[in-house]
Amino acid sequence: MGEEERALPIVIVGHVDHGKSTLIGRLLYDTDCLPADKYSEIQKSSEMLGRIVEFAFVMDCLEEERSRGITIDTTQTFFKTSKRRYVIIDAPGHKEFLKNMITGSSQAEAALLIIDSFEGVRDQTKRHAYILGMLGLKQVCVLLNKIDLVNYSQDKFLELKAEITDFLNKLNVHPNFILPISAIHGDNVANPSKKISWFDGPTVLQALDTFKELKVEEKPLRLPIQDSYTIDGKKILVGRIEAGHVRKGESVYLLPGRKKVEVKNIEKFLENDVAIANFEESIGIRLKGRHRVKRGQILTADLTSTITNRIKANIFWMDPMGYRTGDALLFRCVTQEAPCRIEKIYRRFDPASMEFTEENASSIRSAEVADILIRLDEKVVVDPFNEIPEMGRFVLEKDGRPVAGGIIL
Amino acid sequence: MKLFKGKEKKGFIIGIDGVPYSLLTTYIKNDIMPNLKKILNDGLAFHQMNASIPDISSVSWTSFNTGVNPGEHGIYGFTDLKPDSYSLYFPNSKDIQAPPFWEILGKTNQKTSPLCQDYCNKISHPCRSIIFNVPHTYPASPMNGILVSGFVAIDLKKATFPESAYAYLHSIDYLIDVEAEKAKEDKAAFMKSLFECFEIRKKAISHFLAEESWDLFFACITETDRLHHFFFDATMDKENIYHESFLRFYREVDQFIKYLYEQYRKRCPEKGFFMILSDHGFAPVKKEVYINRFLEEKGFLVLKDRGNFYERIEPHTKAFNLDPCRIYVHGEDAYPRGTVKKEEKTALLEEIKKSLRGLRGENGDEIIDKIYEKEEIYHGPHTRMAPDLVCLPRDGYDLKGSLEKKEVFGDNIFKGMHTWHDAFCILPENINFLKKPSVESLTEHILQYFTQ
Amino acid sequence: MDHLTRLENKSIYIIREAYYQFKEIAMLWSVGKDSTTLLWLCRKAFFGHIPFPIIHIDTGYKFPEMYQFRDERAKEWNLNLLIGKNEEKLKEGMGPNQGSKLDCCNELKTNALKMVIKKLNLKAILLGIRRDEHGIRAKERYFSPRDSQFKWDYENQPAELWDQYQSTVEEEEHFRIHPLLHFTEFDIWDYVKREKLPIVPLYFSKNGKRFRSIGCVTCCSPIDSEAKNIEEIVEEIRISKTSERSGRAQDKENIYTMQKLRALGYM
């Protein structure tokens, strides 16, 4: 409640039945982050049934909380360690997860990839892992859950660990940790377990505590124009600073035209004399002189942006209907929109089956990833994803709905 | 940890809400339901059965699910008043004070009952059950298997356990219930929606049946109850424009039962335990009877104009009615404004019973068939909250609990009403009943089968 | 950037985006604290000149303090205030004691709004719903998507807008935009405090009682409370076991249950 301390956003991915809900319940319970009035309910029931059913209750309670609209909300599920707070960004299904990640509306800085030790790796496990890699999520912790179902066997764990490391490397994901846990019994989640005494690595919480918050690095200004208003005869451009900062009086560039302009004033309601505006602020800008400015143009600090109508990218196709070369799509990146076509499909494959399905393909199937070349009807302003992610991720739409998400190479 | 071995025992229960024994008999005889006829010859017996008292779905299914009477499970209707108040609430699955048979068999029960105590120690392996669209199981509680709640369920997510079941149902746009509210506006469209809803129901049931492992499968079809409420005048009358559709619906039910039976037999080649039942019967409606208006006219009930529902009860009130016909004495020990003293109760009940027996329809018909005092029909720790009097009407007169009516008799859009005496059950012929079975007496046989 | 500023910036972005996408747009103002916060954010987004109408659906039964507050703000903030009222039904004497509360809400709120939307030919409306208010449905989106089965989710209206009772589902063809989705109840109060936003005095304790949510006089009850200002309210909420929504969410389910039972002749 007004706490300034920032929570590290994490996302928990993996196959839907591999124990994500139980893990969340366990994380909340073991860190004392469950709402107080749930304790007595859980305790009472636990007494009657033995500990194992506790988690059905925790999740039952969380479900109830959610449906009764009380404070817990899974897209804002908080827990804490002695070091810091964490917020779990819910990924109900991989489509939403991808959409959220691509559009930046929920940005995780670390991920827990959960795998059922008894069942092993499933297709969805691989797809999620691939997306993590694609989106450059470097801080990944793999959890081999339900280790109790394989009798807490060290051999089994090592066998699985090797298998997983192998396939993850192929997907260019290099996890920081691979941990054996049992969310339902609480082994190695918040506390180490005697049953896994052969394991000398950290608990889940300890692993999370080693992760770093992504520093907001100093990047050059990127301010996509969202709209233009005329207020009291003055023209005010509005937009959100996607990278960097802007100062009053500063000279900046208006792209794609590469026009040099001066920031006359930074406009914020009821604030006069704003000297500087920073990353993530939604502001108004007045430029000196008269200029034709419209939505989709970008104000930048320098000319390092890529201005192009051909983009090399890596995409994940979400739509059940696949893609054929030549099909028309709409490219959307920040406030820019341009009709486009995928000109070349260099390579496409299904991360779940891990084979390089096809080179120089002419189609892409649902749930596949592809390295492509997009040709747009007009020039757009972008940056490579690994330099300025906000300007390097995009969505492709067809008939008004998102069909793929991607990153610019 | 012990690995769970597959059991040879498999149980299968189909519930068809509101289907009367008498109607089913006729349809079997007239070859409207040839598949059911065939199945009956496969070692099964067909019995008429008594529903719960009162004979509404929430009570009847709960009695079946738990195998005990309302005095043990605590559910007396769709509505009830919170203790020591006039606040109306809708009891849900969390308010049921006895465990359902799937929790007993699955060893996940959090509550207990005499029936449970008799059997819980005899269960060697927990049973995995799929419980589909069974009324009055909302919200869904965690259990061993899959649970999808039936009527009244509001939120599909809260109505399913586990989450993967919800994901599937969400993907097929599953409907928990038809929108009965629409029947008023467009009956033809509503009839259509019944078939559509049934299709989705069948699809979902078939999915879980085929894709999941189970020891016990219990699925309910609730569309029949809706069909009967609005179209019961079409059962026999060939002139009725909905007659053909009505028969067609039953034919589809017949086909589906055939399909389910075949699937069941595939998984369970030997005898197994197969059951079909309804929770109450149906009869055509002549008139609705508003018991609260009757009590008002006789001076037992005094209401003020302002307030919600039972908050309108004035201190002078001696008794009031909850839907359908559950009469409560306005005792000073039980209600904030209650004035009836303990010692006055017996005489008061006699007076009310006399009045009720005197209630006559337009042709001089007797309206009330049976009147029970609570101790006559309810036994168990929750008898205290039971209604003091419960009435069952003669077929054709539908007793209601509305507080808004200005006349004792009225008409409505409904064509059918529930009946207590005309439910049915079909189960293995080796199970004999000494007297006419009632809905809560069936459950024990399920438990027996799995623990033999 | 601090927490509240982050929330604020996000909302402003969404509001501006909504205006760009739908020029025929309006904001629904219930005069309660959430939608007043939204109104304030709209003022910020458009530098004090909100370019679309602010709609107040007036059932005719609102608290006098609400009408006063509404008219004061409309004047002070120079709002394009439009009042939606089902005059016809009110003339017939419609009210919560005339028939059912559901019918009353249906006629005086839903239908009144329907009429306004039709009259203004609105394509979208901005609403002050928070995500922590309505976990009942699956994840709500900032922009509710339009598709062939699009239904107006009346149950997703904020508390102050619909009081305790809901009306029947209606079919409408417009988008709903929720710029406050990421605000929690606490965040709203914190923001109100920080911005020194005026809110209807009914929220504050008078004679040992205050209102947790405000709507029609006939259907709103106060709670026991001594909280006379925002700090005290925040503290009270922090301590209390239930939240603003818990009672209401259950009320919502109760309403649906009642509807369903009624449709089959029970009740």
Image (cartoon, rainbow, N blue to C red):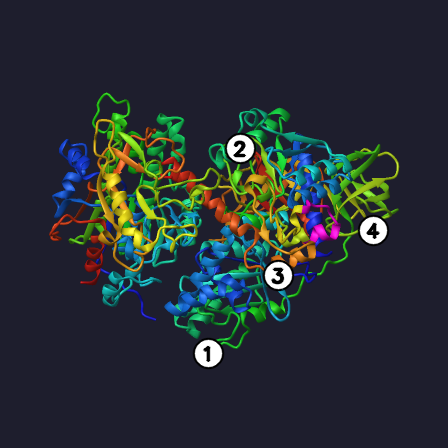
Q: Which residue is mark 3?
A: A138
Q: Quadrant of residue B172?
A: top left
- Which numbered disc flags the more N-terminal residue, 1 or 3? 3
Amino acid on which the number 2 mark rests in the picture: Gly
Q: Chain of mark 1?
A: A
Asked whether the residues under the numbered discs 1 and 2 touch, taking CB atoms below 8 Å apart as contact, a structural biologist would say no
Asked whether the residues under the numbered discs 3 and 2 touch, taking CB atoms below 8 Å apart as contact, a structural biologist would say no
Tell me the SS state at disc 4.
strand
Q: Which residue is mark 1?
A: A194
Q: In the image, which residues are magenta?
A: C190-201
User: Can I make out residue B134 in this image?
Assistant: no
Q: How would you rate the neighbour count of disc 3 (Cα within 10 Å): few for under 14, some for 14-19, many for 20 or more?
A: some
Give the label on residue A276, or none.
4
Tell me the SS state at disc 3.
loop
Q: Quadrant of residue C262?
A: top left
Q: Chain of mark 2?
A: C
Give the label on residue C95, or none.
2
Q: What residue is shown at x 35% (from left), y 26% (from top)?
A: B188
Asked whether the residues under the numbered discs 4 and 2 touch, taking CB atoms below 8 Å apart as contact, a structural biologist would say no
Amino acid on which the number 3 mark rests in the picture: Lys
Q: How would you rate the neighbour count of disc 4 (Cα within 10 Å): few for under 14, some for 14-19, many for 20 or more?
A: few
**At which x and y percent is residue B312?**
44, 42
Between marks 1 and 2, how big is the CA–CA gap? 67 Å
Tell me the SS state at disc 2.
loop
Q: Nearer the viewer, residue A170 or C76?
A: C76
Q: Chain of mark 4?
A: A
Asked whether the residues under the numbered discs 3 and 4 touch, taking CB atoms below 8 Å apart as contact, a structural biologist would say no
